[in-house]
Image: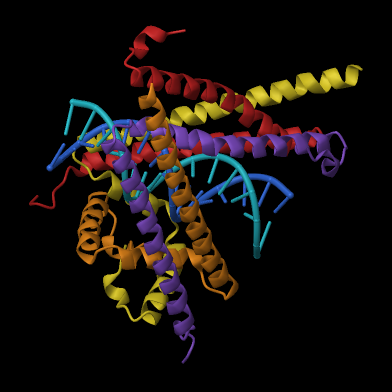
Chain colours: A purple, B orange, C yellow, D red, E blue, F cyan
Amino acid sequence: MAEGSIAAGQLKSLVERIERLEEEKQTISADIREVYAEAKSHGFDTKVMRQVVRIRKQDSAERQEEEAIRDLYLHALGMAPDSSET
Amino acid sequence: MAEGSIAAGQLKSLVERIERLEEEKQTISADIREVYAEAKSHGFDTKVMRQVVRIRKQDSAERQEEEAIRDLYLHALGMAPDSSET
Amino acid sequence: MAEGSIAAGQLKSLVERIERLEEEKQTISADIREVYAEAKSHGFDTKVMRQVVRIRKQDSAERQEEEAIRDLYLHALGMAPDSSET
Amino acid sequence: MAEGSIAAGQLKSLVERIERLEEEKQTISADIREVYAEAKSHGFDTKVMRQVVRIRKQDSAERQEEEAIRDLYLHALGMAPDSSET
DNA sequence: TCGCCTGATAGTTGCC
DNA sequence: GGCAACTATCAGGCGA
């Protein structure tokens, strides 16, 4: 119970929660791989599919990025970005 | 011509399943980050916690193998392997 | 009106200097990758080599501190710290 | 000179080359920071500058990405990407 | 099936 | 000191 006595129970709980979540994440990843495998078995080019998924994901990210830059510029020009909602 | 249409619908379904799964994965990742944040707020060293999680995941045989090679390398470089545990 | 122009030239110069430096940095990174590739082709385990480079860079005091905390955590989780060097 | 005898000299040489290169890289990084600091001292908004640098870098990257996707699609359609040089 | 390469994830570093 | 961006590492997918 001296200095070395950290909150063992608490630590254990936290680590186990993390491990549980990582396990779930692994499961999801496996599911994704499975879908791609299925797609491939139906004759789709998975490489192209991955590109498509990627592009769709980028679209919104890009839009957000653009918006952020615009606000930044407006701010640099001394204008309130808040008034620039689309 | 029907052929293309059928494939299109199938492709759409597959892509959407993947996107749904990736979304779930993102959620899990966020949860994990959250747990680490919580741990930090309780005074734990998250960097070390990550090391611990990693150690628990890694097979001990594998770990020993790596360690042996590393000691060999350190020795070859004229460093004492004993003092170099990371 | 001259003001804006002057600032523009200055800005351009600064940006170009940055870009030049980033380019150099990229080159160095490529060189490093190349050395690792060469090492690999000579039969070295690059993963371990990276560990070794890291160990040499890390201050030993800092290393020991981290190690102490890790052992504490592992102990709290009921694992023998002695067998867990990474 | 038994089993433990790896090519120590070779390893040492490789590691030192890597360390030398990493040192150079650090120097470049410091230079970049310095340029940003200088810019700031001249009244420029470094956050915006970083965005600008980032955008300029993306432009070419994006072009390349687009080209890659195009080749991929052409390939998927059974056409040789090689004949599509711009 | 093994090795290589690319993409995703985690760790480190710099900024606020 | 905390947060965000960048870099380096690691794991999975693809091709030989």
On the question of residue C31 being in view, the answer is no
* Residue at the spot 32% in from the left edge and 38% down from the top edge: A39
Q: Is residue A65 visible?
A: yes
* Residue C39, placed above or below residue D60: below
Image label count: 0
| Quarter occupied by the C terminus of chain B | bottom left
x, y percentage for residue D37? 71, 38
The percent coordinates of residue B32 (x first, y second) are 49, 63
On the picture, is C17 further left or further right than A57? right
> In which image quadrant can residue A13 be found?
bottom left
Residue B48 in the image, given as x and y percentages of width and height:
45, 66
Q: Residue at x 44, y 19 (%)?
A: D70
Name the quarter where the N terminus of chain B is drawn. top left
Q: Is residue D62 above or below residue F10?
A: above
Q: Nearer the viewer, residue D14 or A2?
A: A2
- Tell me: residue A56, above or below residue A11: above
Residue at (43% x, 32% y) in the render: A51
Q: Position of residue C34 (x, y in %)?
A: 33, 31
